[in-house]
Amino acid sequence: MTAVDDRPQTQDHAQMLPETFEALASLAEREEEGLRLEFLGGRLGAKSPPDGLRTTVTMWLARQCAQQKPQWGLHVGLGLTVETYRKGRARPDGTLAPVGHFVGAGEWGEPEGVLMTVEVTSFDRDTTQRDRIDKPRAYAESAIPVYLLVDRDTREVTVHSEPDEGVYQKRVIVPFGKTVTLPDPVGIELDTRQLTTWARAEDA
């Protein structure tokens, strides 16, 4: 049996060029509704379509951001160019940036000026690799100040911050139901009791 190398690939050994990926991703969206491709660590991947709770959580976060920081907007479904060396492409569940920041950006926006990215886990086999390993690395490499992970498996909220040399130096984990402060430059306080209510409803 041939061993499989699961290590992130360098740009020289990536499956394809970023330009090729963009053309493929655009074609996939036209041909298959809900199919959203990503390109991280030099590898092609598919992101699961948002289900009911994932969509609800993203909308809840958007309202929290708008209420506390009306000058900012949580953009949903926007693609980002990430990974300094590998030139990856990611589709965060939410991207916090000043209102109007992405006007004229096209399908894939640049990470400069982005304050925070948000991911809400899905119940698929790629969640651990994608949301807990690849995404934190990619967003830290791109110097995005805060990465917020809403983890439905562990029922925890993880706040990554202080990116340096491709790694978030600080990580705060709180269970659903607690209040967590998103650090500067975000500066938003989240009361996550609502997440507990929705998680219980999902189990029912």
Image (cartoon, rainbow, N blue to C red):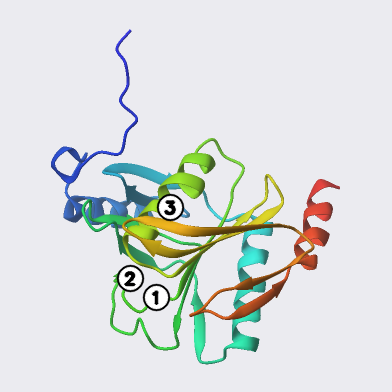
Q: Amino acid at mark 1?
A: Val
Helix, strand or loop status at disc 2: loop
Q: Please give the name of the residue rendered at 62% of the width and 63% of the height, measured from the top-left corner.
A: 55
Three-letter code, disc 2? Pro
Q: Which mark is residue 84?
A: none
Q: Residues within 10 Å of mark 2 (few under 14, many from 20)?
A: many
The image position of residue 98, as x and y in percent, is 44, 86
Along the viewing direction, whichever of 67 and 33 lies nearer the viewer? 67
Cα distance between the residues tagged 1 and 2: 5 Å
Query: Dot 1: what SS?
Result: loop
For the residues bearing labels 3 and 1, Cβ distance under 8 angstroms:
no
Mark 3 or mark 2: name the one nearer the start of the chain.
2
Locate residue 61 relative to residue 191 in the image: left or right.
left
Q: Report how far apart the C-alphas of labels 3 and 1 lie in the structure.
A: 15 Å
Find disc 2 in the rendering and name its residue.
Answer: 111
Q: Quadrant of the N terminus?
A: top left
- How would you rate the neighbour count of disc 1 (Cα within 10 Å): few for under 14, some for 14-19, many for 20 or more? many
- Residue receiving disc 3: 135
Q: Residue furthest right?
A: 204
Instruction: Work out how far the residue at label 3 is from the one at label 2, CA to CA, in angstroms.
Output: 13 Å
* Rendered location of residue 48, percent (x, y): 51, 48
Instruction: Give the side of residue 176 with respect to residue 70, left or right.
Output: right
Task: Name the residue rendered at 79%, 62% in the picture.
Answer: 177
Q: Picture coordinates of residue 40 (x, y %)? A: 33, 48
Label at residue 114: 1
The residue positioned farthest toward the bottom in the image shown:
71
